[in-house]
Amino acid sequence: MSAVRTLIIMTLATLTLAQAVHAAEEVNLYSARKEKLIKPLLDRFTLQTGIKVNLVTGKANALLARLKSEGMNTPADLLLTTDAGNLYRAQEAGLLQSIQSQTLNNSVPSQYREPSGQWYGLSTRARTIFYSKSRVKPAELNSYADLADPKWKGRICIRSSNNIYNQSLVASMISYQGEAKTEAWVKGLVANFARSPKGGDRDQIKAVAAGQCDIAIANTYYYGAMLQSKKADEKAAAAQVNLFWADQTGRGTHVNISGGAVTKHAHNKANAIKLLEFLVNDESQAWYAEVNNEYPVKSGIKVSKILGTWGPYKADTLDLHLLGKYNAEAVRVMDRAGWR
């Protein structure tokens, strides 16, 4: 073999090795979490590991559609999104793969992860009742089931039925009591709406403060964000509302997750797993609570001051993959009941 040919082969081998090393030093992330809610953690991950994170953010449904259209050509290694229902949709569409990680299994309680390792919860949030301090007494409140009582007629605000958070709440009820009983409850709830559903969770809390309704259902982290908001109207609205932990004598308050999953066609699978593991370490979990007003998924992590003021509560222990399993039934029930 000539010296020139040997040099060429050695050069090509070096280039190939360099490309492999470069690939191993990055991970491509599709995130439904807003950049400001995840970027500081990603920067910390890069600082500690040397692995660059290429971040693409977007709405949950848009990211799922993008993964489907890209197929095996997707650059995405990891998907972060909100709600177990969205993670289940990605799983059912064949967009994810099972992974094995003792770190994740030890950190994430079994009810907050998919049994075969296709997705893992990274933080939790509760979807509970918020009420007017001036027009509702806590003693009047009890459970989600109680919201169908005629005493609440014209007094409830909630967002639309196409919202995955509401779909998952209804799906959780179906998993406990079946479709027929849940449909009866949804019909009673809809009959008590103060207005046609519109807006996001913050809008429901604002509507209570404005006197358009007396109680609302919303996720806790929105309330926490409003209490600390730099927008005077949001902060003032939140100050007129209190949080009530639903179903404390029953199954517990409905909880959901933000979570992550390795994509089916991940080119940087090992790095994707490393990033997921990083997001459940003590430092990251504490950051979630402090900055995002979400509860750590990992036990033993101190919650932020504002979450601490809400006190401990009994959380529903339902396996969250069931929220996806019963999602289609939940949507049908909501449609039949006239929840728009």
Image (tube, rainbow, N blue to C red):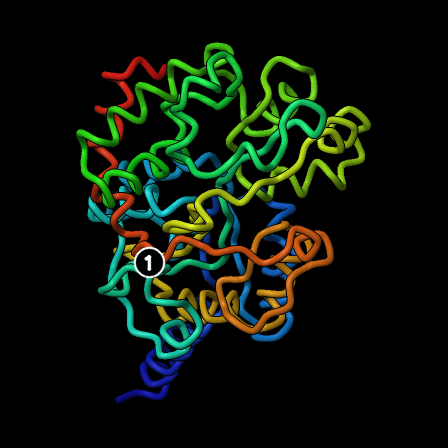
Q: Which residue is nearer to you in this view: 99 or 166?
A: 166
Q: Which residue is nearer to you in this view: 99 or 331?
A: 331
Instruction: Please say if 287 is above or below 213.
Output: below
Q: Which residue is mark 1?
A: 119
Locate the C terminus by quadrant. top left
Q: Which residue is nearer to you in this view: 144 or 261?
A: 144
Instruction: Please say if 5 is above or below 254.
Output: below
Residue 134 lies left or right of residue 221; in this view the side is: right
Label total for image: 1
Residue 306 lies left or right of residue 188; in this view the side is: right
**In the rendered image, which quarter is residue 239 located in?**
top right
The residue depicted at 63 percent of the width and 31 percent of the height is 137
Mark 1, secondary structure of its residue: loop
Q: Is residue 163 shown to the viewer in this render?
A: yes
The residue depicted at 33 percent of the width and 66 percent of the height is 110
Q: Where does the image place residue 196, in percent across and percent down from the top left?
A: 46, 10
* Badge 1 amino acid: Trp
The residue depicted at 40 percent of the width and 23 percent of the height is 149
Instruction: Please say if 106 is above or below 149.
Output: below
Locate the N terminus by quadrant. bottom left
Residue 35 lies left or right of residue 173; in this view the side is: right
Q: Where does the image place residue 111, in percent across and percent down from the top left?
A: 33, 61
Q: Where does the image place residue 108, in percent across and percent down from the top left?
A: 41, 68
